[in-house]
Amino acid sequence: MNKNYNESRNFDALGRDALTALDPDAARILRRLQKAYAAHAAACKAGQKDGPAPTYGYTGPAAEARLSREEADILYRRADLFNLCALAHQARQALHPGNIVTYVADRNINYSNICVCACRFCAFFRPPGHPEGYVLSREELDRKIRETIALGGTQILMQGGHHPDLSLSFYEETLTWIRNAHPGIHIHAFSPPEIMFFAEKEGLSVEEVITRLMRAGLHSIPGGGAEILTDRARSQVSPNKCSSGAWLGVMKTAHQLGLKTTATMMFGHEEEEGERLDHLFALRALQDDTLGFTAFIPWTFQSAHTNIVCAPETAQGYLRVLALSRLVLDNLPSIQASWVTMGPQVAQLALLAGANDFGSLMIEENVVAAAGVSFRLSREEIHAVIGKAGFMPRQRSMGYRLLD
Ligand code: SF4
């Protein structure tokens, strides 16, 4: 039995057939996937298939590895964490053989915290007229980008609140200014809810808004604002934000216009467990259609200073979702560990539970910090954390091109 888990250090360490102790349905599914990923890895090695491609145009493993919704539910509820993570690591190794773990060096720039959305989980926003509300000046933006470049950063992730008084022209002019002032920087900006807000405010289609932003300098779109992609959960935690269909629609339009995007899931608040799976399956269906997502970033809700009271998600709960993400999202090349919310030690474990990417150096972060979580890591610390988990850190671009 263990021979098929050769890529899994944890499983090998057991030295026995841990599957025999499992729920029989979960064990049957784990064995099927284990075989499929082993066959995929072997075929890639023998050159019978396209090699694993950690970037665009990726085609996943054979259909035998595809999980149905029912199977995913069984694994999520009944597989033991150890075997789930071991299988997710095997899937990761089949797609990304070797021991490279990538990360991007970027800075989160929040151009404004003024927002009319008032999501219950958000500790970052301030309503219009609030004394702590701000809109970054050009000078501040310029300083932040210069600092990013000086630290070896290649990208800015620019997002903000739903500001009622800023026009689409303001965002276009900002993008054009950044492009002209800092032509080397990659502009990863405006999550789907912001784009929906721009479209509704200006009376334009999503396609027109994205096209205009692309013309002005937008390079890619971050997967923020997804929270949980069901309308039940969204109406509860972010009733004024765009619907799940609108979020997916913006991403589909962006992909059709040639933009790459990421996808996220914020979990551990008021969603039902099954809604986490709904989220994953909605992303998988869209990715089947467009292949436009480069990466998936699941992260846990942080409750301090928000209007939601709940216990924090455990490390085990996080790893279970992460591992299941790798297995369900068989068409999405990269899964990121969230050291910003889980801390470096759990992020190390995530690298053995399906994640192949360490996210971002995050030279600046405001949104999670506003909710009371303040893990910070320097580039040297990121290298050390990845290295101590047995992997080789490599800096990448948004498109997963290795840069060092
Ligand atoms: S999460 Fe975004 S949209 Fe919601 S209140 Fe915060 S800034 Fe506004």
Image (cartoon, rainbow, N blue to C red):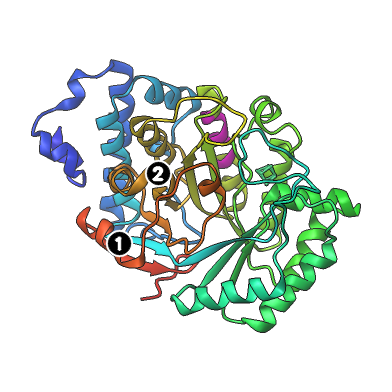
Q: Label 1 amino acid?
A: Glu
Look at the numbered disc 2 and give the secondary structure of its residue. Answer: loop
Residue 381, numbered circle: 1
State the quadrant of the N terminus.
top left
Image coords of residue 331 (percent x, y): 48, 47
Residue on which disc 2 sits: 62
Image coords of residue 256 (percent x, y): 69, 57
Picture layout, residue 192 above or below residue 57 = above
Q: Residue at x 54, y 45 (%)?
A: 264
Compared across the picture, whether 15 is left or right of 384 comes to: left
- Nearer the observer: mark 1 or 2; the answer is 1
Q: Nearer the viewer, residue 177 or 134?
A: 134
Quadrant of the rendered structure where residue 141 is? bottom right
Q: Quadrant of ligand 1?
A: top right
Q: Label 2 amino acid?
A: Ala
Compared across the picture, whether 143 is left or right of 393 comes to: right
Compared across the picture, whether 373 is left or right of 283 comes to: left
